[in-house]
Image: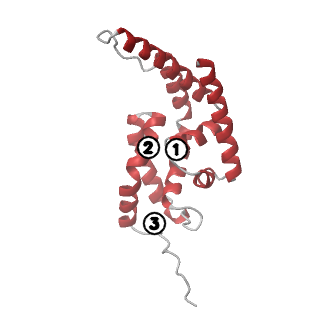
């Protein structure tokens, strides 16, 4: 009987591994962080994620989580430090609604834009109004494209807790969306 060999465990044991992780994960991490905290903050946070990863490389256990989940965990922890500014930014976006000049557009485009702005403000306000735990899970799924298992590992909670928080967040957002209809 031939035994199947498990894939090699990737340890963060040298700068070349960190560089490979950076090549594989920096762009999606930046996209996720930019959507949560803005591009300028994301630029700094991506750098901080890899700095923290390097500084804490001895704590990385590849048997518990892969590099992607571990890096998103670090990113989420760094985002928590920016929680206040994130919530403030979402509330400001909700007030402003991402307005753009509609003077040169035809009437129906203006009406569509106004409707979209109203919906965007309401959704941003609803997201800002979620509990931080629900918002983290929702945005890790939506913008980080992590699975429930990866999020559970990232946040140090049970997978069922992730699913429950995600369900609650989605229910609250659907309720808000139904009000708009």
Q: Are marks 1 and 2 in contact (CB under 8 Å)?
A: yes
Label 3 residue SS: loop
> Mark 2 or mark 1, which is nearer the start of the sequence?
2
Q: Residues within 10 Å of mark 3 (few under 14, many from 20)?
A: many
Q: Which mark is residue 141?
A: none
Q: Which mark is residue 78?
A: 1
Q: Position of residue 78 (x, y in %)?
A: 52, 44
Q: Position of residue 74 (x, y in %)?
A: 52, 50
Check the picture and name the quadrant holding the C terminus.
top right
| Picture residue at 34% right of the left edge, 13% below the top | 101
| Picture residue at 38% right of the left edge, 41% below the top | 43
Label 2 residue SS: helix
Task: Report the coloring of the rendering.
Answer: secondary structure
Q: Position of residue 69 (x, y in %)?
A: 53, 55
Question: Where does label 3 land, which residue?
Answer: 12
Label 1 residue SS: helix
Could you tell whether 178 is left or right of 106 in the image? Answer: right
| Picture residue at 49% right of the left edge, 63% below the top | 57
> Mark 3 or mark 1, which is nearer the start of the sequence?
3
Query: Separation of disc 1 and disc 2 at Cα?
Result: 7 Å
Question: Where does label 2 land, which residue?
Answer: 45
> Mark 2 or mark 3, which is nearer the start of the sequence?
3
């Amino acid at each position: 009987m031939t035994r199947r060999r498990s894939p090699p465990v990737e340890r963060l044991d040298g700068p070349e591994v960190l560089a490979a992780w950076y090549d594989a994960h920096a762009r999606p991490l930046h996209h996720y962080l930019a959507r949560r905290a803005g591009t300028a903050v994301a630029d700094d946070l991506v750098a901080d994620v890899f700095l923290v990863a390097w500084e804490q490389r001895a704590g990385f256990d590849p048997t518990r989580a892969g590099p992607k989940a571990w890096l998103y965990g670090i990113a989420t922890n760094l985002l928590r430090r920016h929680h206040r500014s994130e919530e403030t930014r979402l509330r400001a976006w909700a007030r402003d609604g991402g307005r753009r000049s509609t003077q040169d557009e035809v009437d129906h485009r203006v009406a569509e834009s106004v409707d979209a702005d109203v919906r965007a403000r309401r959704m941003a306000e609803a997201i800002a109004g979620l509990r931080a735990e629900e918002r983290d899970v929702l945005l890790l799924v939506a913008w980080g494209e992590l699975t429930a298992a990866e999020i559970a590992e990232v946040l140090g909670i049970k997978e069922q807790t992730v699913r429950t928080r995600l369900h609650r967040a989605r229910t609250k957002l659907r309720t808000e969306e139904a009000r708009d209809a």
